[in-house]
Image (spheres, rainbow, N blue to C red):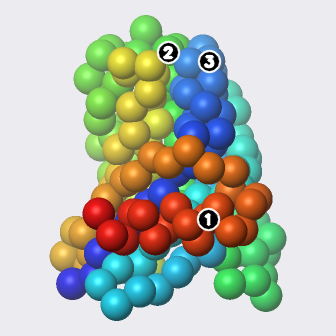
Amino acid sequence: MIKRIIVLPASLKDTLKEIANKYNECAGALFYLPRKYEHAVVCPLSHILILKEGTPGAVTLDYYDIKKIEKILNNTRLNYILFHTHSTGTIEKYGAYYGTNFSEQDKQIINRFLRTRRDHISMLVTPYNGLYVKFYYDSAYSDLELKIVNWDPYEKDKVAEAIEVILSN
Ligand SMILES: [Zn+2]
């Protein structure tokens, strides 16, 4: 069993908070260059791509979006996490439950992704308590842990430094 540590830089956290607090839902991908260590794979999120925005309940990512993302990442070693928001509009329209939970439809779609790619990770982002983040992944394949750190993902030395701190904790 591997352990994957998702590292969310504070700047990206602010971006997620901003989009989760919109009325409309958003969906897209977060990119990272995986770093493999003896006991863990560290996944420092560095870029965000918003692919869709629309009315609450109407935004879902499908295979066409995955194809688009994989085309963008072609010939790079970057990997991605899919994300979508349950926005203030979602919660207003469908109830507080969706402020902390994936919908049944979300799970069905993600389970299909997981069947073709066992290491797939989907992330739910909501405005609950300011910002709420939840992952859906194959827990038999890996453990998952989220760390939020203060660093600029474009400063390479700082990334290495932050990872050292994470791994020593
Ligand atoms: Zn959803």
Residue shown at 52% from the left, 61% from the top: 162
Q: Tell me if residue 139 can be seen.
A: yes
Q: Earlier in the sequence, mark 2 or mark 1?
A: 2
Instruction: Describe residue 98's horizontal placement relative to residue 116 as left or right.
Output: left
Residue annotated with mark 1: 159
Residue shown at 51% from the left, 23% from the top: 87
Instruction: Point out the image quarter for the N terminus.
Output: bottom left
Instruction: Point out the image quarter for the C terminus.
Output: bottom left
Q: CA distance from mark 2 to mark 1?
A: 32 Å
Relative image position of residue 34 (x, y in whole percent)? 55, 77
Q: Earlier in the sequence, mark 1 or mark 3?
A: 3
Residue 60 got which mark? none
Q: Tell me if residue 58 can be seen.
A: no
* Foreground residue among 153 and 13: 153
Relative image position of residue 156 (x, y in whole percent)? 72, 68
Q: Are marks 1 and 3 in contact (CB under 8 Å)?
A: no
Q: What is the quadrant of residue 110 in the picture? A: bottom left
Which residue lies most toward the top here? Answer: 92
Front tag of 2 and 1: 1
* Tag 1 secondary structure: helix
Residue annotated with mark 2: 88
